[in-house]
Image (spheres, helix red, strand yellow):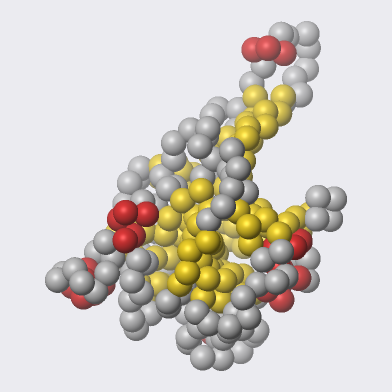
Amino acid sequence: MSGRIQRWTAGVSATCVTTLIAMSGCGDSATAPREETFRGPQVAVGAGMAWSEMVFDTSHELAGLSVVFTEGALSNLPPTLPATEFIIPMPSQAPATVYNHIGINWQPQGHPPPMVYTVPHFDVHYYLISMSARDAIVPADPAYVAKLLRAPTAEETPAGYSPDAMGIPRMGNHWADLSAHEFHGSPFTSTMIYGFYDGKMVFIEPMTSKAFLESKPDETIALKVPAKYPQPGRYPTNYRVAYDATTKEYRVTLQSFQTRS
Protein backbone atom coordinates (compact mmCIF):
# COMPACT_ATOMS: atom_id res chain seq x y z
CA MET A 1 0.00 0.00 0.00
CA SER A 2 1.22 3.48 -0.63
CA GLY A 3 0.14 7.08 -0.64
CA ARG A 4 2.36 9.55 -2.45
CA ILE A 5 5.33 7.74 -4.00
CA GLN A 6 8.63 8.29 -5.75
CA ARG A 7 10.01 5.91 -8.39
CA TRP A 8 13.59 4.68 -8.34
CA THR A 9 14.79 2.44 -11.16
CA ALA A 10 18.23 1.18 -12.11
CA GLY A 11 19.66 -2.07 -13.37
CA VAL A 12 21.72 -4.31 -15.54
CA SER A 13 20.83 -6.96 -18.11
CA ALA A 14 18.82 -9.98 -17.04
CA THR A 15 20.53 -13.33 -16.73
CA CYS A 16 19.33 -16.91 -16.92
CA VAL A 17 20.68 -19.77 -14.84
CA THR A 18 19.84 -23.31 -15.98
CA THR A 19 20.06 -26.21 -13.56
CA LEU A 20 20.19 -29.80 -14.75
CA ILE A 21 17.87 -32.07 -12.86
CA ALA A 22 19.58 -35.25 -11.76
CA MET A 23 18.48 -38.22 -13.84
CA SER A 24 19.00 -41.90 -13.21
CA GLY A 25 20.30 -44.21 -15.92
CA CYS A 26 22.49 -43.37 -18.89
CA GLY A 27 20.28 -40.85 -20.73
CA ASP A 28 21.68 -38.01 -22.77
CA SER A 29 22.03 -35.00 -20.45
CA ALA A 30 21.51 -32.68 -23.42
CA THR A 31 17.90 -33.86 -23.67
CA ALA A 32 17.22 -34.29 -19.94
CA PRO A 33 14.42 -32.16 -18.44
CA ARG A 34 15.73 -28.89 -17.07
CA GLU A 35 14.61 -26.52 -14.36
CA GLU A 36 15.33 -22.95 -15.36
CA THR A 37 15.90 -19.90 -13.18
CA PHE A 38 15.69 -16.42 -14.71
CA ARG A 39 16.96 -13.33 -12.91
CA GLY A 40 15.89 -9.79 -13.66
CA PRO A 41 18.03 -6.65 -13.63
CA GLN A 42 19.33 -5.44 -10.29
CA VAL A 43 17.76 -2.30 -8.84
CA ALA A 44 19.38 -0.19 -6.13
CA VAL A 45 17.42 -0.39 -2.86
CA GLY A 46 18.84 1.24 0.26
CA ALA A 47 22.52 0.35 0.48
CA GLY A 48 21.97 -2.86 -1.47
CA MET A 49 20.20 -4.36 -4.44
CA ALA A 50 16.94 -6.13 -5.28
CA TRP A 51 15.84 -8.11 -8.31
CA SER A 52 13.18 -10.52 -9.50
CA GLU A 53 13.71 -14.23 -9.94
CA MET A 54 11.47 -16.70 -11.78
CA VAL A 55 11.79 -20.49 -11.58
CA PHE A 56 10.21 -22.74 -14.22
CA ASP A 57 9.93 -26.47 -13.57
CA THR A 58 10.84 -29.33 -15.90
CA SER A 59 7.44 -28.97 -17.59
CA HIS A 60 8.22 -25.29 -18.30
CA GLU A 61 5.55 -24.16 -15.83
CA LEU A 62 6.08 -21.26 -13.43
CA ALA A 63 7.05 -22.73 -10.05
CA GLY A 64 8.40 -19.73 -8.13
CA LEU A 65 8.39 -15.94 -8.37
CA SER A 66 10.58 -14.01 -5.96
CA VAL A 67 11.86 -10.62 -5.03
CA VAL A 68 15.41 -11.03 -3.74
CA PHE A 69 17.03 -8.42 -1.46
CA THR A 70 20.69 -8.27 -0.49
CA GLU A 71 21.38 -7.56 3.19
CA GLY A 72 22.31 -3.97 2.39
CA ALA A 73 18.86 -3.28 0.95
CA LEU A 74 17.47 -3.07 4.49
CA SER A 75 19.79 -0.21 5.48
CA ASN A 76 20.10 3.40 4.34
CA LEU A 77 16.44 3.52 3.36
CA PRO A 78 14.59 6.87 3.34
CA PRO A 79 13.53 7.45 6.98
CA THR A 80 10.55 9.72 6.39
CA LEU A 81 7.49 10.08 4.20
CA PRO A 82 6.60 9.99 1.37
CA ALA A 83 6.79 6.28 0.74
CA THR A 84 9.28 5.23 -1.93
CA GLU A 85 8.44 2.89 -4.79
CA PHE A 86 11.13 0.74 -6.38
CA ILE A 87 10.15 -0.73 -9.76
CA ILE A 88 11.51 -4.26 -10.15
CA PRO A 89 11.32 -5.52 -13.76
CA MET A 90 10.59 -9.12 -14.62
CA PRO A 91 13.40 -11.12 -16.25
CA SER A 92 13.25 -10.17 -19.93
CA GLN A 93 14.36 -13.63 -21.08
CA ALA A 94 11.73 -15.53 -19.09
CA PRO A 95 8.60 -16.99 -20.70
CA ALA A 96 5.55 -14.72 -20.54
CA THR A 97 3.26 -15.07 -17.52
CA VAL A 98 0.37 -13.08 -16.06
CA TYR A 99 2.87 -11.06 -13.97
CA ASN A 100 3.91 -7.77 -15.58
CA HIS A 101 6.25 -6.12 -13.07
CA ILE A 102 6.87 -5.74 -9.34
CA GLY A 103 6.55 -2.58 -7.28
CA ILE A 104 8.20 -2.55 -3.86
CA ASN A 105 6.87 0.24 -1.67
CA TRP A 106 9.05 1.10 1.31
CA GLN A 107 6.84 2.46 4.09
CA PRO A 108 9.15 4.06 6.70
CA GLN A 109 6.30 4.85 9.09
CA GLY A 110 3.81 2.27 7.90
CA HIS A 111 0.29 3.26 6.85
CA PRO A 112 -3.33 2.89 8.06
CA PRO A 113 -5.08 1.27 9.71
CA PRO A 114 -3.48 2.66 12.89
CA MET A 115 -1.99 0.16 15.34
CA VAL A 116 -2.06 -2.51 12.63
CA TYR A 117 0.31 -1.58 9.79
CA THR A 118 1.91 1.53 11.30
CA VAL A 119 5.39 0.00 11.51
CA PRO A 120 8.23 0.24 8.95
CA HIS A 121 7.57 -2.35 6.26
CA PHE A 122 7.74 -3.34 2.60
CA ASP A 123 4.70 -3.71 0.34
CA VAL A 124 5.70 -6.14 -2.43
CA HIS A 125 3.18 -5.74 -5.26
CA TYR A 126 3.24 -8.41 -7.97
CA TYR A 127 1.26 -6.57 -10.65
CA LEU A 128 -1.05 -8.30 -13.12
CA ILE A 129 -1.36 -5.08 -15.15
CA SER A 130 1.12 -2.90 -17.03
CA MET A 131 2.67 0.37 -15.90
CA SER A 132 0.51 2.25 -18.42
CA ALA A 133 -2.63 0.63 -17.01
CA ARG A 134 -1.53 1.66 -13.52
CA ASP A 135 -0.92 5.22 -14.70
CA ALA A 136 -4.55 5.34 -15.85
CA ILE A 137 -5.81 4.67 -12.29
CA VAL A 138 -6.11 8.34 -11.37
CA PRO A 139 -8.76 10.68 -9.95
CA ALA A 140 -8.71 12.61 -13.25
CA ASP A 141 -10.55 9.68 -14.83
CA PRO A 142 -14.28 10.59 -14.63
CA ALA A 143 -15.05 6.93 -13.85
CA TYR A 144 -12.35 6.64 -11.15
CA VAL A 145 -14.70 6.53 -8.15
CA ALA A 146 -17.11 4.15 -9.87
CA LYS A 147 -14.23 1.81 -10.74
CA LEU A 148 -12.97 1.92 -7.15
CA LEU A 149 -16.43 1.04 -5.86
CA ARG A 150 -16.97 -1.77 -8.35
CA ALA A 151 -16.34 -4.86 -6.23
CA PRO A 152 -15.19 -8.21 -7.60
CA THR A 153 -17.71 -11.02 -7.82
CA ALA A 154 -17.93 -13.54 -4.98
CA GLU A 155 -16.01 -16.02 -7.14
CA GLU A 156 -13.18 -13.53 -7.58
CA THR A 157 -12.96 -12.60 -3.88
CA PRO A 158 -10.80 -14.61 -1.45
CA ALA A 159 -12.83 -15.76 1.56
CA GLY A 160 -12.72 -13.35 4.49
CA TYR A 161 -11.22 -10.43 2.56
CA SER A 162 -12.64 -6.90 2.79
CA PRO A 163 -11.66 -3.65 1.05
CA ASP A 164 -9.91 -0.67 2.56
CA ALA A 165 -12.05 2.43 2.94
CA MET A 166 -10.19 4.42 0.30
CA GLY A 167 -8.54 3.70 -3.02
CA ILE A 168 -5.02 4.68 -3.98
CA PRO A 169 -4.06 6.17 -7.36
CA ARG A 170 -2.02 3.86 -9.60
CA MET A 171 -3.12 0.90 -7.48
CA GLY A 172 -6.82 0.71 -6.75
CA ASN A 173 -8.37 -0.83 -3.64
CA HIS A 174 -6.43 -2.95 -1.16
CA TRP A 175 -8.31 -5.93 0.29
CA ALA A 176 -7.14 -7.45 3.59
CA ASP A 177 -7.92 -10.67 5.45
CA LEU A 178 -9.68 -9.48 8.60
CA SER A 179 -8.97 -12.81 10.31
CA ALA A 180 -5.20 -12.23 10.00
CA HIS A 181 -3.14 -12.11 13.19
CA GLU A 182 -2.42 -8.38 13.00
CA PHE A 183 -6.14 -7.57 13.35
CA HIS A 184 -6.39 -9.58 16.57
CA GLY A 185 -3.75 -8.15 18.87
CA SER A 186 -0.57 -9.72 17.50
CA PRO A 187 2.21 -7.54 16.08
CA PHE A 188 2.27 -7.37 12.30
CA THR A 189 4.96 -9.57 10.77
CA SER A 190 3.80 -10.60 7.29
CA THR A 191 0.45 -10.81 5.55
CA MET A 192 -1.16 -11.08 2.13
CA ILE A 193 -3.10 -8.25 0.49
CA TYR A 194 -4.97 -8.43 -2.82
CA GLY A 195 -5.55 -5.39 -5.03
CA PHE A 196 -8.69 -4.78 -7.11
CA TYR A 197 -9.75 -2.06 -9.52
CA ASP A 198 -12.84 -1.91 -11.71
CA GLY A 199 -13.89 -5.26 -10.24
CA LYS A 200 -10.72 -7.09 -11.33
CA MET A 201 -7.67 -8.27 -9.41
CA VAL A 202 -4.68 -6.09 -10.34
CA PHE A 203 -1.99 -7.22 -7.90
CA ILE A 204 -0.98 -9.84 -5.35
CA GLU A 205 0.84 -8.23 -2.43
CA PRO A 206 2.80 -9.89 0.34
CA MET A 207 3.51 -7.25 3.00
CA THR A 208 6.32 -7.84 5.46
CA SER A 209 7.70 -5.72 8.27
CA LYS A 210 11.34 -4.66 8.25
CA ALA A 211 11.72 -6.12 11.75
CA PHE A 212 10.41 -9.48 10.56
CA LEU A 213 12.93 -9.59 7.71
CA GLU A 214 15.72 -8.61 10.10
CA SER A 215 14.80 -11.59 12.30
CA LYS A 216 16.06 -13.75 9.39
CA PRO A 217 12.91 -15.87 9.13
CA ASP A 218 12.00 -18.88 7.08
CA GLU A 219 8.23 -18.98 7.09
CA THR A 220 5.74 -20.32 4.55
CA ILE A 221 2.20 -18.96 4.73
CA ALA A 222 -0.82 -20.56 3.06
CA LEU A 223 -2.99 -18.23 1.01
CA LYS A 224 -6.71 -17.75 0.80
CA VAL A 225 -7.35 -17.74 -2.93
CA PRO A 226 -10.37 -16.87 -5.08
CA ALA A 227 -12.25 -19.41 -7.14
CA LYS A 228 -11.70 -17.32 -10.26
CA TYR A 229 -8.98 -14.98 -11.55
CA PRO A 230 -9.13 -12.16 -14.14
CA GLN A 231 -7.18 -14.17 -16.72
CA PRO A 232 -5.96 -17.75 -17.11
CA GLY A 233 -2.51 -18.40 -15.70
CA ARG A 234 -0.40 -19.73 -12.86
CA TYR A 235 -1.31 -18.40 -9.41
CA PRO A 236 0.26 -19.07 -5.99
CA THR A 237 -1.32 -20.98 -3.12
CA ASN A 238 1.30 -19.95 -0.57
CA TYR A 239 4.20 -17.58 -0.14
CA ARG A 240 7.51 -17.77 1.69
CA VAL A 241 9.57 -15.13 3.49
CA ALA A 242 13.08 -16.42 4.07
CA TYR A 243 16.69 -15.44 4.73
CA ASP A 244 19.50 -17.38 3.08
CA ALA A 245 22.55 -17.35 5.37
CA THR A 246 24.82 -18.65 2.60
CA THR A 247 24.07 -15.91 0.07
CA LYS A 248 23.05 -13.33 2.71
CA GLU A 249 19.85 -12.61 0.81
CA TYR A 250 16.21 -12.16 1.76
CA ARG A 251 13.49 -13.64 -0.45
CA VAL A 252 9.78 -12.97 -0.67
CA THR A 253 8.49 -15.77 -2.90
CA LEU A 254 5.14 -16.66 -4.42
CA GLN A 255 5.09 -20.45 -4.80
CA SER A 256 3.06 -23.67 -4.99
CA PHE A 257 1.48 -22.40 -8.19
CA GLN A 258 -1.64 -23.85 -9.76
CA THR A 259 -2.97 -23.29 -13.25
CA ARG A 260 -6.21 -21.36 -12.85
CA SER A 261 -8.74 -19.44 -14.91
| Quadrant holding the C terminus | top left
The answer to whether residue 126 is seen in the rendering is yes
User: Measuring 53% from the left and 56% from the top, which residue is drawn there?
Assistant: 9
Left or right of 60 in this view: 171:
left
Q: Quadrant of residue 26?
A: top right
Percent coordinates x, y for residue 52 in the rendering: 59, 48
User: Measuring 33% from the left and 60% from the top, which residue is drawn there?
Assistant: 134
Q: Quadrant of residue 54?
A: top right
104 over 40 or under it: above or below: below
Left or right of 202 in this view: 149:
left
Front residue of this view, candidates 104 and 233? 104
User: Measuring 56% from the left and 76% from the top, which residue is drawn there?
Assistant: 107
Which residue is at the far left?
A: 142
Left or right of 168 in this view: 221:
right
The answer to whether residue 229 is seen in the rendering is no
Front residue of this view, candidates 248 and 60? 248
Count the marks: how many? 0
Left or right of 94 in this view: 161:
left
133 over 31 or under it: above or below: below
Percent coordinates x, y for residue 117 in the rendering: 55, 82
Percent coordinates x, y for residue 199 in the rendering: 26, 63
User: Measuring 65% from the left and 84% from the top, which residue is drawn there?
Assistant: 187
